[in-house]
Image: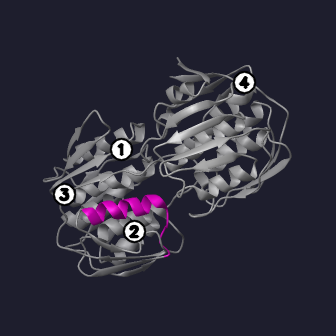
Amino acid sequence: MDKLAIQGGARLSGEVRISGAKNAALPILCAGLLSADTLHLENLPKLKDISTSLTLLGHLGMQVSLDDQGGVALQAAHLDKLEAPYELVKTMRASILVLGPILARYGEARVSLPGGCAIGSRPVDLHIKGLQAMGAEINIEHGYIHAKASRLKGARIFMDTVTVTGTENLMMAATLADGTTFLENAAREPEVVDLANCLIAMGARIEGAGSDVIVIEGVDKLHGATHKIMPDRIETGTYLVAAAITQGQIRVLNTRADIIESVLDKLREAGAHIDVGNDWISLEMRTRPKAVNLKTAPYPAFPTDMQAQFMALNCIAEGVGTVTETIFENRFMHVQEMQRLGADISVEGNTALVRGVDKLEGAVVMATDLRASASLVLAALVAEGESIIERIYHIDRGYECIEEKFAQLGASIRRVK
C-alpha cells in the first residue's frame, strides 16, 4: 500500500493550479441521470471518488466518455439497472446522490445505504423525508433504500438541519416533479450553486440557490448541456495553509477568493499577507504564524473540511488556539497522529485546545480520513526529519496529484511502497 514520505523544513514557493471541486463534481455527475441527452462536463478532477462515481454510473447503464483535458461526456439515454449496489456505494457516501435523479426520471430506485469516511454520522433520513413529502413510497429493506413514485409532486420541504447532499438530492429530484418545490433551510454552499447552475443549463427552473430557500418549478424533461465545474475551495485552502505553515510565498491559480472568504480571514488573522485576483490568490507569510480560534459551521461560516488543516497550523503557531467542531462528532481523529509528531493538543468534547510548539518532529503517522490526511501532510512539511504517512488512499479521494503539486512548490515529498 502506498505511503507518502516527507522531509520537513522546506519553505514553499511558486505557483500551483487548483483542480475542479470534488464536492461539486460528484452531484453534477449524478445530474446526468436526469436527461437522455448528453451532458458535457469540463474541469473534472482526477480523483478516486470521481472514478468510483463514474464506475457506479456505468454500472447503471450510463455511457461515459472521458477526454484528455479533464472533460467527460455522460449520456443516460437508457439505464440498464435502477439499483446502486452496496459494493459500489460502500466507500463513498455521495453515492446516495443517484437516488433522487433515478427516482424522478424512472419512478423507482433502489440504493444501498452509503458508507464513506468514519468522521461521524451523516444520516440520510432528511433525503428520505423530503422524497416522501414529494409523494414517494420508501422502504428500507436489507440495507437498501427502495423508493417508488409514478411521478414526484412539488412540495414544501423544511430540513431540520442543514444538509448539503440532502439539498442536492432533493433539488435534482424536484427538477422533474409535477409542480413547485420549496426547499427551506437549504444548504448555501457554493457546490450547491454550481449544481443548480448545471441543472439550469439543462433546462431546469431553479431560483434561490445560494440562499436558505431554493424554489424549483418542475419540468417535463431536461436536455443536454455543457458545464465547467467550479474550482475546489478546500484544495485551495489546503495549499494556502501549507504556504502559511512553512512561512512561504505562493500563488494558487484557477480558483476564486469569494468561495473561501472565511478561510482567508483566518489566514490574515494568523499573520498572512494575501492578495486576490479574478482567478488567483497569493499568500506570503513573513513570520511565525499566530494561533487562531475557529468554529466550524455551515457555509458561509468556517468549513469543517478545513478544520484539520488549521489545527496543523496552530500546532506550530505562536500562542494558543481553540478549534471547535460542530458538524461531525468524530472529526478529531487526526489529533493523536499529530501528537505523534510532537503537537501539544488536548481535547474536551467538541473543542481542541492547541498550544503552539517551537518544532514538530518527523514520525510515522496514519491518515484516518480525507481531510485528516491533508493535515498530516501539512504538519510533516514543518517537522524536523522525515515523516511517513500511511493509508494515503484517503488523500487520493480528494487531492489530485498531491505529491507532484507540493513538489513543484519546493516540498521534499515522494510516494513510496
**Rendered view: 217 above or below 251:** below
| Residue 3 % position (x, y) | 56, 23
Answer few, some or many: residues within 10 Å of disc 1's Cα (few below 14, many 20 plus, some between 14 and 19).
some
Q: Circle 4 — which element?
A: loop
Task: Name the residue: 69% across, 40% down.
Answer: 244
Which residue is tagged 2? 128
**Hey, what amino acid is under mark 2?**
Ile
Residue nearest the observer in this picture, 411 or 128: 411
Q: Circle 2 — which element?
A: helix
Which residue is tagged 3? 224
Q: CA distance from mark 2 to mark 3?
A: 28 Å
Q: Is residue 339 magenta?
A: no
The extreme top residue here reads 417
Question: Taking 212 as reference, is 79 left or right?
Answer: left
Which residue is tagged 4? 9
Sequence-earlier tag: 1 or 4: 4
Magenta part of the chain: 185-201
Q: Circle 1 — which element?
A: loop
Sequence-earlier tag: 2 or 3: 2
Which residue is tagged 1? 43
Sequence-earlier tag: 2 or 1: 1
**Rendered view: 96 above or below 338:** below
